[in-house]
Image (cartoon, coloured by chain):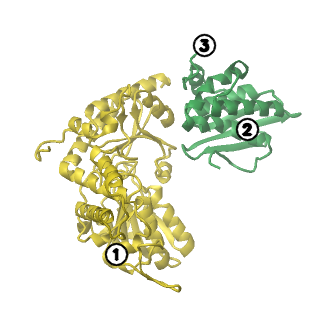
Chain colours: A yellow, B green
Amino acid sequence: MIVKDQALDAVMLRNDFPVLSRSRNIPALVYLDSAATTLKPQCVIDAIVRYYSEYGGSVHRGIYQIAERATEEYENARKQIARFIGAKTTESVIFTKGTTESINLVAYAWARHILKPGDEILLTEMEHHSNIVPWQMVAKTTGAHIRYLPLNDDGTLNLEDAHRYFTPQTKLAAVIHQSNVLGTVNPVERIVKMAHDAGALALVDGAQRVPHHSVDVTELGADFYVFSGHKMLGPTGVGVLYGNLEVLDKMEPFHGGGDMIRTVSMLESTWNTLPYKFEAGTPPIAQVIGLGTAVEYLSNIGLDKITAYEEQLTTYALKALRTIPGIEIYGEAPHRGAVISFNAGNVHPHDLSQLLDRDGIAVRAGHHCAQPIMTRLGISATTRASFYLYNTLEEIDLLVESIRKAIDFMGG
Amino acid sequence: MDDFRDLYQQLILDHNQNPRNFREIPDTDLLLDGHNPLCGDRIKVYIRRGDKRITDISFTGSGCAISKASASIMTTILKGKTFDEAKKIFDNFHRMITTGDANLEEMGKLAVLAGVHQFPARVKCAALAWHTAMSILNDKTHDIVSTET
């Protein structure tokens, strides 16, 4: 039972996560890689098991009870998610495999049909590969150009000359809401407005934002807002594309197949209404229902409470990490999320994460699918610790202690 | 004897901190880049050849302790070997780090890398310098060696 005005009690919440509460590992798992994927609460696992064990029928087809229940639960999840992100209608909430597929959907079903040679796609130096590579593929087929808003040394976007990057040729600005490497929260409201003023559409990659902070897609006004289920306590294999109805309506389908059509003849077909036009084939039913449950779990706790708790963890972690001699932290943005990238002494991130694993600590090492940031910072890799509602201050102490040990072990 | 299940043997830490033959060989055309795109590690291996024999071998670049130590130990072992001997040592080494199957007595210093096979994510680190050196010996000096091909 959660009392609304109390601070978040992570120690109690940990009981909801079987990987944390049931594990008999020694040392105990300290999971600091939620920016990659989050652990799942029992209620999400139960919802998935319930679908498969009680009513595992297909959706939008069967005229029998379990199929009707599956459809109802599936569509109910869409309502829960629409509410969660402030979408006015469920038609604008499309289920995909994840953030990557959501962006590819826009690249294929919108950009490839619209962009002409000389048109411009505006990205930032902070993007994840999933918000770079699809646009490079689009540019190659359409003759469009990609431009990048530059990064400041502190890990914020340099928007001083941003107006120069928006030209009459700009057709799309695609921006990460919160960096998966630097933690920076970008002023996406401002960028969406600049895009619209320039007559361009705006796509915001919310994969690292939606799990940690309340988002209102209607207020933000981006034409596309994308995120993944598995980074917000939901299952893998499901994500969301929220889209502006007018834009979605004019778009061609992405995949052709069952459920996305209205009529099919030997010569041609007509398309189903939104959102089904973009959901060809049998969808990930269990995953969608699981994501609905995850969203309900997060809402019951309260996103504001989660954000406040993560701020506490991040402030504590930054301070504690800075006490380690030779540590370098990448990203000093004043407005940031619960993600910290760093290098410790001369210890390579792969060695560091391997040594932390001996103490049961799971962190990420590498370029985090964001090589342009690494190039900009002049490094090849970082170690990254990222936090979520189930992490504790004690776990951060363990991290810091283990890093100190690793530096000693490797001889500085 | 050290516990060979441990990834970070003392000798590995030593070669990581004080890599041997960590230098360029300026006047050779037998050199090649090795790249592990997963971790961004980049090394360059140099070989000087005389009468089908490796008369000098060195490396430069950056990487994790496993890749650096493996490169360093490799240079100390392959110096003076014939190409055929080097290829045979590589075969034995590669089998050891991928399957754990090896005669540790015969492997000499390379035995410190026997534990790598228990850490599949690190096999590529240990193999990078070796693949690069073997590509040179196999006359494939026109390419960059990548662990992701």
Chain containing the residue with disc 3: B
Say few, some or many: other residues with alpha carbon within 10 Å of mark 3 (under 14 / 14 to 19 / 20 or more).
few
Badge 2, how many Cα within 10 Å: few under 14, some, many 20+? Answer: many
The chain carrying label 1 is A
- Determine the CA span between mark 3 and mark 1: 68 Å
Give the label, 3 or 1, closer to the camera: 1
Q: Is residue B101 visible?
A: yes
Q: Dots 2 and 3: beta carbons under 8 Å?
A: no
The reply to whether label 1 and label 2 mark residues of one chain is: no
Dot 1 falls on a residue whose secondary structure is loop
- Left or right: A274 in relation to A411: left
Q: Report if the CB atoms under discs 1 and 2 are less than 8 Å apart.
A: no
Decide if residue A124 is on the left or right side of residue A313.
Answer: right
The amino acid type, in three-letter code, at marker 3 is Met
In the image, residue B7 lies at what x, y percent?
Answer: 55, 26
The single residue placed furthest to the right in the displayed view is: B51
What x and y, as percent, mark residue A280? 43, 70
Residue A342 position, x and y percent, is: 41, 39
Q: Looking at numbered disc 1 in the image, what kind of residue is underneath it? A: Leu
SS assignment at label 3: loop
Name the residue tied to disc 1. Answer: A274
Q: Which mark is residue B88?
A: none
**Residue identifier under label 2:** B133
> Which three-letter amino acid code belongs to the residue tagged 2?
Ala
Instruction: Say which mark, if any, is on residue B1.
Output: 3
Q: Position of residue B14 (x, y in %)?
A: 58, 22
Q: Nearer the viewer, residue A176 or B56?
A: A176
Measure how far apart labels 2 and 3 are at the Cα level: 30 Å
To the question of a shared chain for discs 2 and 3, the answer is yes
Q: CA distance from mark 1 to mark 2?
A: 57 Å
Q: Is residue A13 left or right of residue A366?
A: left
